[in-house]
Amino acid sequence: LHGANCKFAHGEGDLLLSRWKPSLEDDVVSKLRALDPDERLAILRRLDARGDLVKNPSAYLARACANAEGKAALDTVDESEMEKLMSTWGSALDNEAMSCLMALRTSDRLQVVQSLDAKGEREEVRNPSAFVYQECQKRPIGSASGGACKIALCKFFAEGSCKKGEAC
């Protein structure tokens, strides 16, 4: 059932699970076992680090499993849908908008293009590139935080007198 490299089945994961298992509901243990072994081990380590601060370990693990499953679902994107949307809108985007879009996580990229498609069909978007810039600013780059790209420098930066300097 588990490979030789499975950290969870051999060693630390089993030890952590055995420590908490008496206070866990069976369905929570099943959900935990269904996760990726590395994710499972990370969740058990976090629970163990919190120790007695966790009043209901079953509820804590149920929430952690749901969060992990949700995160995994966001990371899987229907590539055919993305290709279809990009064939429709890709040519309408300038190079800077395309660069900003490509700097996003795949799931965020799909959300931006889906939003553009929905609003574009209703003719609510006059400038697709500007729309993509704005949407990219609301989302983190890859796994980092902050807007995906700078839309435009302020006029003071261009003149060399911006108080924010390079942070502008």
Image: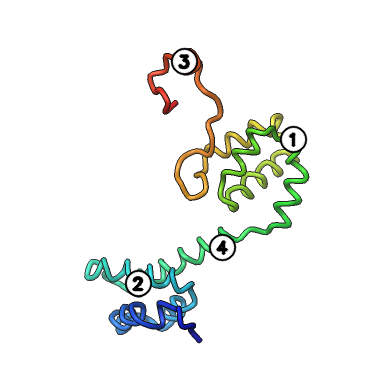
Circle 3 crowding by C-alpha within 10 Å: few under 14, some 14–19, many from 20: few
Earlier sequence position, callout 4 versus callout 2: 2
Number of the front mark, 4 or 3: 3
Closer to the observer: label 1 or label 4? 1
The CA span between labels 1 and 2 is 47 Å
| Residue on which disc 2 sits | 44
Going by the numbered disc 4, the residue's amino acid type is Ala
Of labels 1 and 4, earlier in sequence is: 4
Q: Which mark is residue 156?
A: 3
Image location (x, y in percent) of residue 158: 50, 16
Name the N-terminal-most of marks 4 and 3.
4
In the rendered view, would you say 147 is above or below 34? above
Tag 1 residue = 92
First in sequence: mark 3 or mark 1? 1
- CB under 8 Å between callouts 3 and 1? no
Mark 1 crowdedness (10 Å alpha carbons): few <14, some 14-19, many ≥20 = some
* Neighbourhood count class around disc 2 (C-alpha, 10 Å): few under 14, some 14–19, many 20 upward: many
Q: Nearer the viewer, residue 70 or 122?
A: 70
Residue at image point 58% right, 49% down: 108
